Image (cartoon, rainbow, N blue to C red):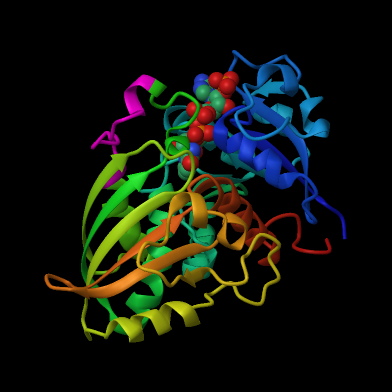
Amino acid sequence: MRRYRVGILGATGLVGQRLLERLEGHPWFETAALGASERSAGRPYGEAVRWALDGEPPPDPAGLPVHACEPRAFEGCDLVLSGLDAESGRRIEPRFVEAGHAVVSNCSAHRSLPDVPVVVPEVNASHLDLIEAQRRRTGRGFLVTNPNCSVTGLVLALAPLHRAFVARRAVVVTLQALSGAGLEGPRGLEIVDNVIPFIPGEEEKIEAETGKILGTVAGGAVRGARLEISAHCHRVGTIDGHLAALSVELESGPAPAEAAEALRAFRGESEGLGLPSAPERPVVVIEGPDRPQPRRDRLAGGGMSVVVGRIRPCPVLGLRLELLAHNAVRGAAGGTLLNAELLVARGLVGGGRGA
Ligand SMILES: NC(=O)c1ccc[n+]([C@@H]2O[C@H](COP(=O)([O-])OP(=O)(O)OC[C@H]3O[C@@H](n4cnc5c(N)ncnc54)[C@H](OP(=O)(O)O)[C@@H]3O)[C@@H](O)[C@H]2O)c1
């Protein structure tokens, strides 16, 4: 089987760095081209990047040149993965789609378009059916996104409950790690000994994207799930791992033990496709009155599982729990790669596996 050639937009950012880290030794993909802003373009990656992960940048991509994000520098790539900030993504990603590329993005700029699927493979792989409608607008190329990093964990925990018991209303309070804000996030003096009770645009994204992902596709658009959500978002001083407290009203009002069983049994729509980045269990139910915790639990399933604990009755909405997802892995680079693998498995890029 040949390996698919992957280009990365925003390769020097935190998500770009995670993508390069996870592409090292990937069985299906190889890093072929890197792009970032004019500040970085023209320099070898190893010089241009302000590396913020453990260790050093992987040696092969470290020697690759960084290009400006122009489609002609990415000719020959089977897939383009984007870790661009929203403003650059809004401008740059459509140019790659117009040039015929399959683009898998982290950025929020196009998630609300009716024909752009926002995908968490275990929950809504079937939303890739939107690509056909999107191609009527764009031609050969297309765009698939993963959700906001808080939404990924939230929908993985909500989907099994919604399917088994039908979710109607939810209140979620997030405690979000610093890496979620990218390389230019809050400085030490702003966040040590502090909590910032505001993340621009985050509550709106949670409230809009969750219903889209849990909805169904019909007639080239998504009919969103009828689920009301109220979100309160906070930036805290952890490095990785978004923790969230969720209260949810479920139509059939399960006992906590029944909810835990539905979460444990969840395998999802993409099970059995052999996707290299898929965790064995998308949802891990953890015991113990003080779990999950970011430092102890964020690497469950290699950072790709959401960890749910403290499942208990809620006197207001019926059921409450805590959930944790690694924002930079499951919520960003790992989620993007899983979506890219799903596109390959579904034959939507490069003729499918084995092409
Ligand atoms: N961090 C997370 O946990 C997370 C999770 C989910 C989704 N996301 C989303 O993923 C995206 C990337 O996040 P991040 O945390 O990696 O951000 P970041 O660290 O700020 O990186 C931004 C990247 O975009 C590039 N860029 C900036 N302006 C550009 C321009 N005008 N033209 C071309 N490239 C430009 C930067 O290149 P230079 O280095 O050359 O400036 C850098 O590579 C964002 O849309 C974010 O909302 C992040």
Residue at 34% from the left image edge and 81% from the top image edge: 259
**Is residue 20 shown above or below 227?**
above
Based on the displayed image, in which of its 4 quarters is residue 181 positioned? top left
Q: Quadrant of the C terminus?
A: bottom right
Q: Quadrant of the N terminus?
A: bottom right
> Within the magenta stretch, is there residue 195?
yes
Q: Is residue 99 left or right of residue 60?
A: left
Based on the displayed image, in which of its 4 quarters is residue 19 positioned? top right
Q: Which of 309 and 176 lies nearest the eye of the viewer?
A: 309
Residue extending farthest to the left is: 316
Q: Position of residue 141 (x, y in %)?
A: 60, 47
Residue at 82% from the left image edge and 25% from the top image edge: 63
Based on the displayed image, in which of its 4 quarters is residue 18 positioned? top right
Q: Which stretch is magenta?
A: 189-203
Q: Is residue 15 left or right of residue 167?
A: right
Residue at 53% from the left image edge and 63% from the top image edge: 305
**Is residue 27 shown above or below 57?**
below
Residue at 39% from the left image edge and 80% from the top image edge: 260
Q: Is residue 134 left or right of residue 234?
A: right
Q: Is residue 345 visible?
A: yes
